[in-house]
Amino acid sequence: MPWTPAARRGGSISIMDLEVSIGRLTLPNPILVASGTFGYAKESAGFVDFSKLGGIVPKTVTWEPRIGNRTPRIVETASGMLNAIGLDNDGIDHFLRVHLPYLRKLPTSIIANVAGRTVEEYAALVTRLNGAEGVDAIELNLSCPNVSCGIDFAINPESTERVISLARRETDKPLLAKLTPNVTSVAPIAQAAAAGGADGLTLINTVVGTAIDWRRRRPILANRIGGLSGPAIKPIALRIVMETAAKVDLPIIGVGGIGSIDDVMEFLVAGATAVQIGTANFYDPGLATRLVDELPGALAAIEENSVRRIIGTLERN
């Protein structure tokens, strides 16, 4: 695995170890880009040095093509955005035939993200990806809030475990479970994911919200509700990562409102092994690679030279 440039500290050179592991998946650094915010990577080729990224999670893929929800389906908020895209994509066959040949050539890990309408559909998607060259891991999207049945699997421990257990039988690739924050407690769902055989957790997906045009007395989104992302949800995501890390012995990928190296460090200290950059990709497409460059300096500032040494080191007041 490539090392970052040495960082000078105290007059000597200390090699910075940015490498992390999510189960059996080893990443050169903990900075990834989140599904739904980065397209299929080709769209960002002019802004991003892919070789710097820890990994790419392309847009969610379903069994059959989906046209998504009616417009309007995106609303800007005071500190983020609401989206009700509805998993618009061209289906698994198109992904394997058109998008994956490009993705597999990129100098970074590819974590395919899939969503199914039924337990069996998740298993079928995983089966198709299991033999696909260039897919390093699979993220199960159990928690999209703006499609029919989109969060059903992730609001119940039994259904979460069933989906992951069946998917686990169909692949030897690392499996990640992307869970919803829209429950009373994420910990029981995360424990069920672990029992089902997940290699790691992605926390969190978007928070359910709405936007209203009071003059017209109508919801702005055609879907009425959408998923809130961006800086507004970072405190929620941090809390869920912190609480889940204390109760579940699985690596966590933290997601939600990350826009600076301070945000990254907060998630790592709270218990995340890696992070995904989401909404920030829309307004600052080069952010993820800059964060990789800034990570050694942040570690040096607290006299550390390894990402793994700071994961989950949050102390009580």
Image (cartoon, helix red, strand yellow):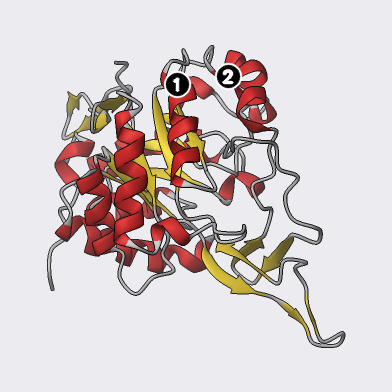
Where does residue 20 sit, x and y in percent of width and height? 25, 32
Q: Are marks 1 and 2 in contact (CB under 8 Å)?
A: yes
Which residue: 25% across, 41% down?
A: 299
Q: Position of residue 116 (x, y in %)?
A: 52, 44
Q: Position of residue 53 (x, y in %)?
A: 45, 28
As drawn, which residue projects farthest toward the front?
Answer: 120
Q: Secondary structure at mark 2?
A: helix
Q: Which residue is mark 2?
A: 100
Q: Residues within 10 Å of mark 1 (few under 14, many from 20)?
A: some
Q: Give the residue number, with chain letter if any, for mark 1.
A: 135
Between the C-alphas of marks 1 and 2, the distance is 8 Å
- Residue sitting at the far right: 216
Q: Quadrant of residue 226?
A: bottom right
Count of numbered tags = 2
Residue at x 70%, y 65% (from the top left corner)? 76
Between 174 and 281, the one nearer to me in the picture = 174
Residue 186: x, y in percent?
Answer: 31, 64
27 or 295: nearer the viewer? 27
- Give the residue type at disc 1: Val
90 left or right, relative to 252: right
Amino acid type, residue under disc 2 in the picture: Leu
Query: Badge 2 local density, few (<14 within 10 Å), some, or many (20+)?
Result: some
**Residue 34's disc number:** none
**Where is the C terminus found, in terms of image quarters?**
bottom left
**Viewer-nearest residue: 188 or 279:** 188
Can you see residue 274?
no
Q: Nearer the viewer, residue 12 or 235?
A: 235
Dot 1: element: loop
Residue 212 visible in the picture = yes
Q: Earlier in the sequence, mark 1 or mark 2?
A: 2
Depicted 74 relative to depicted 208: above or below: above
